[in-house]
Image (spheres, coloured by chain):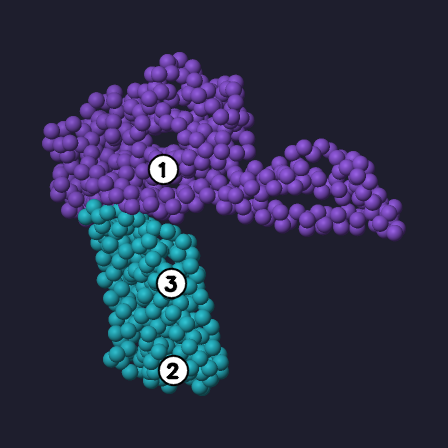
Chain colours: A cyan, B purple
Amino acid sequence: MELTIFLLSMVVSAYLLAFILFIIEFVNTERKHFRWANRFVELGFLVHTLLIFAQTVVIRNVSSDFHLPVTTLGEASGFFAWSLAFIYLILLRQRKSEIFGLVLAPILVLFLIPSFFRFEINPALLKHHHNGYFLIHILSAFFGYACFALSFIAGVLYLNLDRALKRKASFSSYHRFPSLEGLERFIFKTILWGIVLLGFAIISGALWTQNAFGTLILREPKSFASLLTWSVYLVLVYFHEIRERKGRRMVQMSLGAFVLVLFTFLGTSFFQKGLHAGVG
Amino acid sequence: MDLVCIGLNHKSCPVEVREKIAFSESALSRALSEMRQIEGLREWFVLSTCNRVELYGRGFSGVEENLIQFLADFHGLEGCQYRTYLYCHRGREVAHHLFRVASGLDSLVIGENEIYGQIRNAFRLANELGSLDSILYQLVERALRIGKKVRSETKIGEGAVSVSSIAVELAEKIFGKLTGERVLILGTGKMSELTMKHLVKAGAGEIIVASRTYERALELSQKYGAKPIGFDSWLRALRTSDIVISSTSAPHSIVKFDDVKSMMAERRHKPLFFIDIAVPRDVESRVAEIDDVYLYNIDDLKTVSEANLRMRKKEIAKCEGMILEELESFDQWYEFLEAGPVIQKLTTYFDEIVAAEVQKAVSKFKGKEEDLQRLIQKIKAALLHTPVEKLKESAKVGAIERYLETLHSLFKLEQRKPNEYEKEQKRENVPSLRRSESD
């Protein structure tokens, strides 16, 4: 347990340092902190990966020899932070910018905070950890949510830039922002990835419950909320890509859709009992 | 230091005089070739832009007078006509001045980028024509380096300040790289043309020009590869445009709120950017309230320009600090350059000593010549290491002269002629290595 806390503290410190450097980079005139800020995000991600590996294979050998740390709210929240950093660092390598890092770093820290606390383990879940469908379900769901979260961050940036341009704010207040169209493309690209990944999560979840319980869907709020989230995002992408609706209103709607993600990921955990309790 | 710079710029001289002194592209090549005839000039380089004409040179004292005379002769002017506008820098001030110019600190618009490219081009031309030698080459190379450094490490070049470049910068903030964006030009004033020129340079897609005078639209279109249309069909063209530059002389606004509102629904809210540089304004101010429409009039653009200029001015102190650092490094390099011939003479002197002594004992090393050569190199490197390092250190604190004098007097480097060591040996009958070994 001490090792877990120690490694978690290292991860949080790395992200906090990155956050401070992103602020300095954003405010200051010298442009040499960005690289270091990204290095700290990478360091935090690496240590976190090590921690997750240790938790999965070594530390928590409770009921099986393989245990993905997503069985409590704390673990799920931490794993989500890891997924978010993974998407940011690996999949969005070319799109990294100081303004993105500036917003992302504190979010990573926020999602890591619950990992410091002890939450009740959901024992019903432990026996399914060796199931392949279950693992695909968990991983794709988390990465899908991470994509939606990144689209949300880009959406917030879009609205800020839009407001600055409308108000004719000083150029220095937004000169580190990507362009409006670039942000919009990014928002809907990540949403598209999110839809694919969440789709995988829903299908693999159905196959898993079919195997384990003989039903394609668990009658739990999270199952229905996930389907609703997926559908809403699908409609959004349809309007953006097929009907070619662009601009601020579409971005606002994507931000609205993210409320559903939050509800699905966190909200349902507070009033449900079952396999999804405490899990993202 | 024997560097010199004479010139005039936008601060020292009115445009009427500057345009008489400026070198056209072809004249510049000719001038660089003719400067070869200037007495006492060893290397030279000319920087001629719309805001400055500067002649940089290195030569014997008094060469600046020859440069001034050359400038007058080349342009067929009386010397006294422009002499009052001229400034003259000498020694390290030349380097300091050029570093400031390359950094955009001496420009009309602080931090502007154009001067960097102009220096680079002038440097290339001078280099091609062989007018640069080691010192001016090094100076200009360092000027380009510091020019690049201040722009990448400070905000001196950030935020556009001219109306046309602000328009492009804002367009890029909305659309990203301007690759396929369609531009509509309403009215063909000077400012429209300038903005259009910047947009074309930034890679804008199709450009449509609408003017009440069709001939003028045609003329402008031919110049920039645009498409001219009659003024009555501009509203139709607006539907498919992304950027609109408006500068008509209409006495009332021509772009109405209702038209744009209904058009935005048709465009499915693809962003639309209006740059209204007309006075009175061409675009109704309410248009800015429509979602995804961005409207900047001439006052907005000026406000952005002033804010950016203020931001740039805040960076000057930081840039000056960086320039002084580079200047110090150049000074050190230049001072150490003086040590070059002395080190060369010292090395030759050591070579002679070693060669003379080795000659006497060469039979002892038969079959081991390679080892002997290696040993000689090692001894020479060890002997020279400390003095050279000491010279480098003294160059940093500006005390190299004293050390050079000492070396000269210790080893008589000034008067030394080739193979003098051997003659000295014979004269003084110094016991040879072979003899001492046999003893």
Q: CA distance from mark 2 to mark 1?
A: 66 Å
State the image quarter where residue B94 is shown: top left
Q: Residues within 10 Å of mark 1 (few under 14, many from 20)?
A: many
State the image quarter where residue A36 is shown: bottom left
x then y, percent, for residue A86? 41, 65
The residue type indicated by label 3 comes to Ala
- Using the image, name the chain to which the residue with label 3 belongs: A
Instruction: Check disc 1 and report the residue beneath it.
Output: B104
Q: Which numbered mark, 2 or 3, is in the foreground of this view?
A: 3
Residue plotted at (33% across, 84% down): A120
**Number of marks in picture:** 3
x then y, percent, for residue B110? 32, 38
Q: Are marks 1 and 3 on the same chain?
A: no
Whether residue A147 can be seen here: no
Instruction: Check disc 2 and report the residue beneath it.
Output: A125
Q: CA distance from mark 1 to mark 3?
A: 33 Å
* Depth order, front residue of B263/B390: B390
The residue type indicated by label 1 comes to Gly
* Depth order, front residue of B33/B243: B33
* Depth order, front residue of A12/B322: B322
Question: Is disc 2 in contact with disc 1, using a CB cutoff of under 8 Å?
Answer: no
Q: Which numbered mark, 2 or 1, is in the foreground of this view?
A: 1
Q: CA distance from mark 2 to mark 3?
A: 35 Å
Residue plotted at (32% across, 64% down): A149
Residue plotted at (44% across, 41% down): B327
Residue plotted at (42% across, 82% down): A2
- Using the image, name the chain to which the residue with label 1 belongs: B
Residue A18 numbered tag? 3
